[in-house]
């Protein structure tokens, strides 16, 4: 029998003013890219723990969902695991080989807020 339950249900980080930056970023993508990112997040939710090529540790409790978007672009959603859930903290289009330190710092800052 196949286990169809989420092992790591996701929720969106919310700013003190009530904004959800990752949800807003996803809504700003093309319909095709939204579907790709959603599917990749879902793979982590149902397959946790899961590794490359869908997910990778960034260290210090941060992880990234890795998405290959249309037009050769690369999307990343940074998350942490808190109380058995996947907190979607930050997202961006990756333009460099290495994840920019400012994106990791923002993920760490938001992780402290949800803990």
Image (cartoon, grey):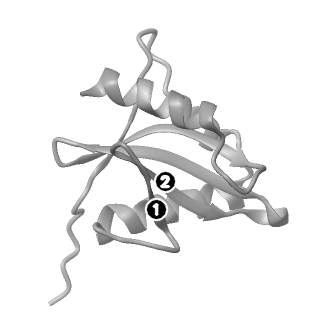
Mark 1: give few (<14), some (14-19) or many (20+) Cα within 10 Å. some
Q: Quadrant of residue 47?
A: bottom left
SS state under label 2: strand
Q: Are marks 1 and 2 in contact (CB under 8 Å)?
A: yes
Q: Estimate the x, y position of residue 54 in percent, counting from the top left.
A: 49, 69
- Identified at 55% across, 29% down, the residue is 21
Which numbered marker is on residue 96? Answer: none
Residue lying furthest right = 71
Count of all numbered marks drawn on residues in the image = 2
Identify the residue position indicated by label 1 in the image.
56
Q: What distance separates the C-alpha of mark 1 from that of mark 2?
A: 5 Å
The quadrant of the picture occupied by the C terminus is top left
Q: Earlier in the sequence, mark 1 or mark 2?
A: 1
Name the one closer to the observer, 81 or 99: 99
- Identified at 52% across, 30% down, the residue is 105
- Identified at 71% across, 58% down, the residue is 74
The quadrant of the picture occupied by the N terminus is bottom left
Image height check: is 100 above or below 40?
above
Identify the residue position indicated by label 2 in the image.
64
Q: Is residue 44 left or right of residue 27?
A: left
């Amino acid at each position: 029998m196949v286990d169809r339950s989420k092992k790591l249900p996701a929720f969106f980080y919310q700013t003190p003013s009530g904004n959800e930056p990752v949800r807003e970023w996803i809504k700003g993508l093309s319909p095709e890219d939204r579907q790709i990112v959603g599917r990749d997040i879902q793979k982590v939710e149902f397959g946790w723990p899961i590794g490359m090529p869908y997910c990778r540790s960034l260290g210090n409790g941060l992880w990234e969902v890795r998405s290959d978007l249309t037009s050769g672009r690369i999307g990343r959603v940074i998350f942490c695991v808190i109380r058995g859930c996947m907190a979607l903290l930050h997202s961006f289009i990756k333009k460099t080989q290495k994840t920019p330190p400012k994106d990791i710092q923002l993920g760490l800052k938001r992780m402290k807020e949800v803990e």
